[in-house]
């Protein structure tokens, strides 16, 4: 289960999958454990060129153990036991990292186009997951039909129906800003519902008092007049499509 959950958090499919999100030395050096965990469930990354005892990797181990026990409550295991198992698995990950020839990747200033495309695709999958969880979290005391329609809307669109985004720091260091690309084929009503789910996610993330919960802040997306070039999702209900686009 440790290995499986690690693949899930790192968004890898198997041991031969590349490590697409490696923290840079600058990010690792700036990390302060007193400010919260180094990772979140949406972005779990470890320093595969450091030791398991480094401040970054110790924080990652603590977060992994907490997240593992929350995800698998049926597995009766202590927090420290998971930390110990993770620390052992960390050495396996370092071996895979070396075998894949990725040593030094965290020091590179530029990303290859394929890596940039992979990161954008990964962000789209993460966005789909956040919106689906937001729809599923709608309270039971609202109209069941509204809740079910919200869930179905996200599921029908799938990750491909989510707006992709681009960063002003693609291939560079620093804290990036993300700009959502417009999907001209998607109807205004559908896009508006997705933004409602985004707002609900942020509300739950920060709490009713809008106080930030532990962990890293989610990346924020703003909007610009650039259009997505990806193909529309086919075979959706007609009202999912912009009437202007259909003409």
Image (tube, rainbow, N blue to C red):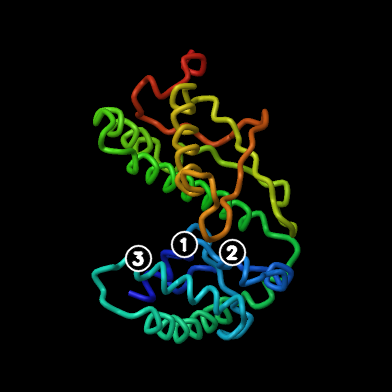
Q: Is residue 204 above or below residue 195?
A: below
Percent of width and height locating residue 62: 48, 75
Which mark, by number, is residue 169? none
Contact between marks 1 and 2 (CB within 8 A): the answer is: yes
Which mark, by number, is residue 70? 3
Q: Nearer the viewer, residue 19 or 68?
A: 68
* Spatial CA span between label 3 and label 2: 24 Å
**Residue positioned 38% across, 46% down in the render:** 133
Q: Is residue 243 above or below residue 108?
A: above
5 left or right, relative to 19: left
Name the residue tied to disc 1.
11
Q: Residues within 10 Å of mark 2 (few under 14, many from 20)?
A: some
Percent of width and height locating residue 15: 44, 74
Which mark, by number, is residue 21? 2
Going from N to C along the chain, the mark reached first, 1 or 3, is: 1
Q: Residues within 10 Å of mark 3 (few under 14, many from 20)?
A: few
**Residue positioned 56% across, 76% down in the render:** 100
**Residue positioned 61% across, 68% down in the render:** 22
SS at circle 2 = loop
SS at circle 3 = helix
Contact between marks 3 and 2 (CB within 8 A): the answer is: no
């Amino acid at each position: 289960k440790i290995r499986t959950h690690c693949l899930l958090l790192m968004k890898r499919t198997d041991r031969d999958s590349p490590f697409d999100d490696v923290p840079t030395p600058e990010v690792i050096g700036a990390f302060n454990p007193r400010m919260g965990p180094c990772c979140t469930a949406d972005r779990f990354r470890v320093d595969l060129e450091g030791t398991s005892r480094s401040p970054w990797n110790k924080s990652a181990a603590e977060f992994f153990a907490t997240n593992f026990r929350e995800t698998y409550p049926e597995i009766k295991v202590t927090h420290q036991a998971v930390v110990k198992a993770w620390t052992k698995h960390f050495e396996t990950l370092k071996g895979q990292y070396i075998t894949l020839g990725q040593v030094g990747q965290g020091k590179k200033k530029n990303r290859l186009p394929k890596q940039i495309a992979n990161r954008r695709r990964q962000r789209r999958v993460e966005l789909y997951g956040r919106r689906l969880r937001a729809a599923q979290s709608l309270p039971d005391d609202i109209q069941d039909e509204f809740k079910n329609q919200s869930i179905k809307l996200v599921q029908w669109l799938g990750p491909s129906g989510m707006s992709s985004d681009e960063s002003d720091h693609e291939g560079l260091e620093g804290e990036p800003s993300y700009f959502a690309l417009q999907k001209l084929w998607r109807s205004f009503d559908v896009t508006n519902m997705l933004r409602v789910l985004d707002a609900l996610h942020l509300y739950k993330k920060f709490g009713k008092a809008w106080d930030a919960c532990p962990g890293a802040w989610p990346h924020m997306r703003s909007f610009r007049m650039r259009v997505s070039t990806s193909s529309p999702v086919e075979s959706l209900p007609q009202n999912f499509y912009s009437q202007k686009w259909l003409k």
